[in-house]
Image: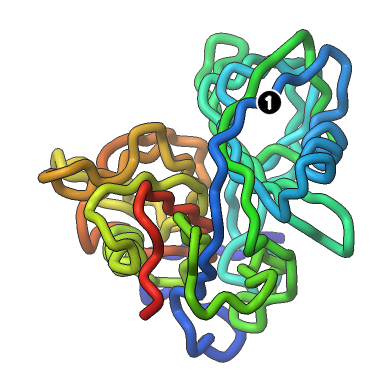
Amino acid sequence: MRRPAPRNRSDIRHPGPLAEDRRPHATCHADPISLELSDGQWLLAALGNWADREGYGSAVLDLSGLNLRSFDYVMPDRAIDDRHAAWYSDTHSSGGATLEEAVAILGWRDGTWFAHIHAYWHEDGKARLGHLLPETLVLNGLAQSKGFGLTGARFVSEPDPETEFTLFRVKQDQPNPSNQNHNAVIATLAPFEDFHQGVAALADRFSGPTYEVHGLGSFAGAEFTDGRMMPGLISEILIRSGAGRRQDQKLMLPVRCVDLTGQLYEGMVKPGGAPTLVTCELLLTSQTTVSSR
């Protein structure tokens, strides 16, 4: 039996001690990549084999446009026990679909490749957004993916004491006191860290004002710059193409969201308006180097 949905943010309580570092991050080098995928390939194996061949420790990929055979996914939902702040829904099955927008974080779990994927698609005349189960994904036709291959740091799944979930954590692959040739930061946000403010603080490490933001996560509600809101306090999100800051412009963070009722939202996140629910997994890339401070 699931617990009632939280009525306000004070109802959301994670079971463990607060992590001291609320925005853990690691510097790395991000190579823009384009990856061709073949019909009938298991997606997770194809991505892992590609990363092994190219020598990448992790990757953040745009899977928009991929056509998948039948697959399984879950949605955000209420907790199933008296400890966790939220949980996943029962497993849903899709008959197959083309992913209109999708973000994958490729990292490691139990010593093997693993992918955290949030995607948006239409099926049976209805728009859907869900957390795809990577071991169920098989390509239906040829496809091309773009994104970034990462060296110098990686995402590794570990138990998180604060939330009692197993989550991607960021790991520096090797000491890099000079940060030479590093043009990117990977990071996670802890619960209740504001999404907009967290990204802006992480971007201060770049020596220039222009950068892109990629990733996914979960919000405890959200406010958008056009005045609309997502009132649901348990949600999952993906960051849309175009997120980041351009020269002489403000930081823009367009997202898609789904709450525990299946209601979909999209908009530009308002500063101070989108606290993290469980985690946000981020890649920030720049054409400039990362500051050593």
Expressed as whole percent of the image width and height from the top left, the position of residue 206 reads: 33, 62
Is 250 placed above or below 242 here?
Answer: below
- The crowding category of the residue bearing disc 1, from other C-alpha atoms within 10 Å (few below 14, some 14 to 19, many at least 20), is few
Expressed as whole percent of the image width and height from the top left, the position of residue 99 reads: 60, 21
Expressed as whole percent of the image width and height from the top left, the position of residue 266 reads: 34, 34
Q: Residue at x 45, y 79 (%)?
A: 22
State the residue in front, 274 or 143.
143
Q: Residue at x 74, y 16 (%)?
A: 96
State the quadrant of the N terminus: bottom right
Expressed as whole percent of the image width and height from the top left, the position of residue 5 reads: 50, 60
Q: Quadrant of residue 201?
A: bottom left
In the image, is 236 to the left or to the right of 210?
A: right
Name the residue carrying label 1.
35
Q: Quadrant of residue 69?
A: top right
Question: Can I make out residue 8 in this image?
Answer: no
In the image, is 267 to the left or to the right of 150?
A: left
State the residue in front, 164 or 198.
198
Is 100 placed above or below 224 here?
Answer: above
Is 101 placed above or below 291 here?
Answer: above
* Circle 1: residue type: Leu
Q: Please, what secondary structure does the residue beneath circle 1 have?
A: strand
State the quadrant of the C terminus: bottom left
